Image (spheres, rainbow, N blue to C red):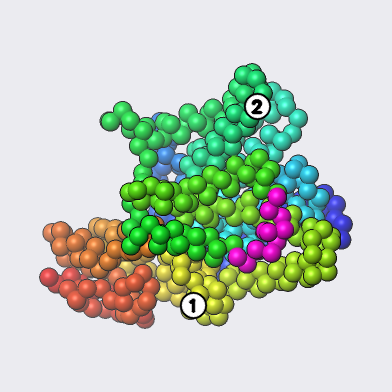
Amino acid sequence: MRVSDRGAGAAAFLAPLAVRAVPEILSWPYPIGFDTLMYAGYAVGETFLRMPLPELLKTTSLLYLVYTLLYKALGDPLLPAKILGPLLTAAVGYGVYRFTRRAGFEPGTALLASLLATAYFVALRISWEMYRQMLATAFLLAALYLEAGPPARRGRLLQALLAFLTAWAHEFITVILLAHKAARSLASRGLRRAVEEALPALPAALLLLYQVYNPHTHALQVPVLHVEAPTRLHLLLYITGFLAYLYAPLSPLLLAGLGQLWDPPLRDWALTCLALTYLPVLNPQGVDILWFRWAILLNYPVAVAAARGFERLTRGGAGGGLGRGAALATLALNAVFTATYLALPPEQQWNKYFGDWNAYKQYVQTSMLQSSIPLRDVEPTIEAVRWVDSLPGDKVLVLHEAFHNWAQLYARNTRLVRVNEQKLSSPLRQNVSQLLLRAASSQNATVYTIWWVSTTWYNMTRPPPQFKPLKTFQDIAVYVYEP
């Protein structure tokens, strides 16, 4: 079926918007996602509104500013998360459409690329919480669209602005942008052409250098984690297994469209992500910059290649009738995956691919219908926070980050201590119980925590025995620390 460019372009914006709005409606009035609650906490504290411009540019703070301004306008710290998720997804979908159209895709194939880039379960996992990344991705796609057009001074200036905004929004997407521009510049013939190709990326490069430069040590400082695994082979298999888990449901389409990944922007994007995904294996110390995030970022070149593969299979270019059947069956399977990931809560997720068969739940959650805790536990958690906040005396809430995200919005008279999940990148995880105890033992006030009565979440069934249950709110309990 042929579609017009105007109609397909409108659908590339509206369809991702509608799909991503589904979990927001089902979870109303609470937001989904983990990082979204941190955005809300920064907005309530007006953290980034109070910063001078040099400090703002020192961090990838653009999304935080947008979120805070929306909060100031709407008066609700949670509502911006409900709005931005669908809007940013739609912006990325439209960006993929325009980029692929300029790359020579027909409207129908470009629309499919847009839908796969936003409605495939990996794309939904991105839109679950990675708002900074999506904002930067929208800027990057716009820059790539301009790059593929006729050369013009105005176009290069706009590319430079988009590159700057990309660097202000998210550092990972900036690395992809700079890697692509470097490859394009090196492949140019003649010094003048090479400089022309590199110049639009200069604002992004300078801003990234400013962000990682430490004025105290006068050195560049990139935050890294040390990945722990029994052997390097185990880590190699673990990472490769994660990539297979992410993209196996699209494999028939991806294999048929694999040649599309040799298109320079997609090639540079994919190679950058693969190199940084496998960096912990290549590095003797297991140094990592969140390898799993780079694996997830492969979603966009994979989506474009899969759309091209669908076109080839359905038009008889590969496999004849069998290829067409495989292409349609793959889309049907992924439509089911999308529906179950969008609409089923984690407690009732019958799709075993996201449940029992998912060995990577810390990276790809079971369902979109959750925040840092199940949605059914949000109201009891808020009640528990407010109850502790109403208690007299000097008190401290030592909280796992999942509960801290909520407490920072509702605790007014209680000091909060955050306990972060450690070694998220490692197959071997640290004991959260010990971290909780260590934080509690260093306080000089009455210490409370909030946790479930019993749970399988975050690999801690109950807090350590030094925490005694004090009051319950359905499945959520307040515990007091008694060493």
Residue tagged by mark 1?
A: 356
Coordinates of residue 63 in the picture (x, y in percent): 50, 45
Q: What type is the residue that disc 2 sits on?
A: Ser
Q: Is residue 26 above or below residue 195?
A: below
Residue visible at 48% across and 28% down? 206
SS at badge 1:
loop
> Does the magenta run of residues contain 254?
yes
Please name the amino acid that badge 1 sits on. Answer: Asp
Estimate the x, y position of residue 106 in percent, counting from the top left: 81, 50
Q: Earlier in the sequence, mark 2 or mark 1?
A: 2
The disc placed on residue 188 is 2
- Disc 2, disc 1: CB below 8 Å? no
Specify few, some or many for label 2: CA neighbours under 10 Å numbering under 14, 14-19, or 20 or more.
Answer: some
Does dot 2 land on a helix, a strand or a loop? loop
Q: Residue at horizontal 53%, vertical 48%?
A: 273
Q: Residue 39 in the image: x percent, y percent?
A: 44, 52
Start-end of magenta stretch: 248-259
Q: For the C terminus, give its image quadrant.
A: bottom left
